[in-house]
């Protein structure tokens, strides 16, 4: 990153998140075994964990702990500690595990740093895209790529909702997925089209980068959205849940002003 940050702590946290995301992404990209198999399941038999999820989380937590032993952790694969520094790291070592298991390219490493409960740094590395998305609270969002170098991120100007390209995701629990499919069926005639990438972190960054006009999903965990939420907000998107609420497990929405409000209203009317 070439731009200076006013807060030295945020600069240090960003550099550490960047290094951890880069190294975990390299491990996942270059170390994926040909016979990769499911190591465990979570919410259902099709919600899987691989040995590489576990290895990537260990790499990240070991690296960060080596530099900042007093920080806390919240990680998808079990890293959990309170810490005493006021900093907590929220980690999804492999967002898009099913994509990764099948050899699809849409997966990412997501690392956020919270200071006294507020996200101040977010890094989402998408190795198969050759890009890393980054944000610091109050300092904007940007992407660095293997081919384009560094560029500032800004969400697209809002089109009319009927021209908006919207992404969503689905639960691995059958009953919840059926309800989500019913909502998508009601929404799709009212927008340009719907996409489903399989990675919440990448969807949020795609809103930030202008590749999507909006995104919504239910059932996310903090590690799914912590970094991507900051990237989207720092790129000019609005993020939230139900009217008057913050983005949460109950509902996550991200879109530029002008798309966010009607999309949120429709989802509320549909009883999401």
Image: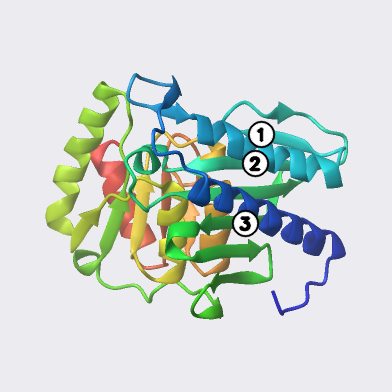
Which residue position is annotated with label 2? 90
As drawn, the label of residue 6 is none
Which residue position is annotated with label 3? 22
- Residue drawn at point x = 87 percent, y = 41 percent: 85
Q: Residue furthest front?
A: 34
The relative height of residue 71 versus residue 204 in the rendered view (above or below) is: above
The relative height of residue 21 versus residue 233 in the rendered view (above or below) is: above
Near-viewer residue (266 or 124): 124
Q: Residue furthest left?
A: 189
Whether tag 2 and tag 1 are in contact, CB under 8 A, the answer is yes
- Residue drawn at point x = 52 percent, y = 36 percent: 52
**Residue 190, position as x, y percentages in the image:** 16, 57
Residue 144: image quadrant is bottom right
Instruction: Assess disc 1: are there few (<14), some (14-19) or many (≥20) residues with their C-alpha within 10 Å of its C-alpha.
Output: some
Which residue position is annotated with label 1? 74
Residue 37: image quadrant is top left
Question: Which element type, helix, strand or loop, lies under badge 3?
Answer: helix
**Residue 254, position as x, y percentages in the image:** 43, 56
């Amino acid at each position: 990153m070439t731009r200076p940050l006013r807060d030295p702590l945020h600069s240090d946290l960003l550099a550490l998140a960047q290094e951890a995301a880069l190294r975990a992404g390299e491990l996942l990209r270059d170390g994926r075994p040909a016979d990769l198999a499911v190591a465990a399941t979570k919410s259902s038999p099709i919600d899987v964990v691989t040995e590489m999820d576990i290895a990537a989380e260990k790499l990240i937590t070991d690296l960060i702990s080596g530099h900042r032993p007093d920080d806390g952790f919240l990680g998808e694969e079990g890293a959990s500690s309170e810490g005493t520094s006021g900093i907590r790291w929220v980690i999804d070592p492999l967002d898009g595990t099913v994509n990764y298991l099948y050899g699809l390219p849409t997966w990412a490493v997501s690392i956020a740093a919270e200071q006294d409960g507020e996200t101040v740094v977010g890094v989402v590395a998408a190795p198969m895209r050759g890009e890393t998305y980054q944000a610091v609270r109050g300092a904007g969002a940007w992407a660095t790529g293997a081919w384009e170098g560094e560029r500032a991120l800004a969400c697209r100007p809002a089109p009319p909702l009927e021209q908006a390209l919207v992404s969503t995701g689905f639960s691995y629990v059958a009953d919840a997925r059926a309800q989500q499919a019913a909502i998508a069926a009601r929404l799709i005639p009212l927008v340009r089209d719907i996409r489903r990438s399989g990675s919440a972190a990448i969807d949020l960054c795609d809103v930030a980068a202008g590749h999507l006009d909006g995104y919504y999903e239910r059932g996310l965990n903090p590690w799914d959205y912590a970094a991507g939420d900051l990237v989207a907000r720092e790129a000019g998107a609005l993020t939230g849940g139900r009217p008057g609420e913050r983005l949460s497990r109950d509902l996550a929405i991200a879109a530029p002003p002008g798309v966010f409000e009607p999309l949120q209203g429709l989802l509320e009317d549909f009883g999401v």
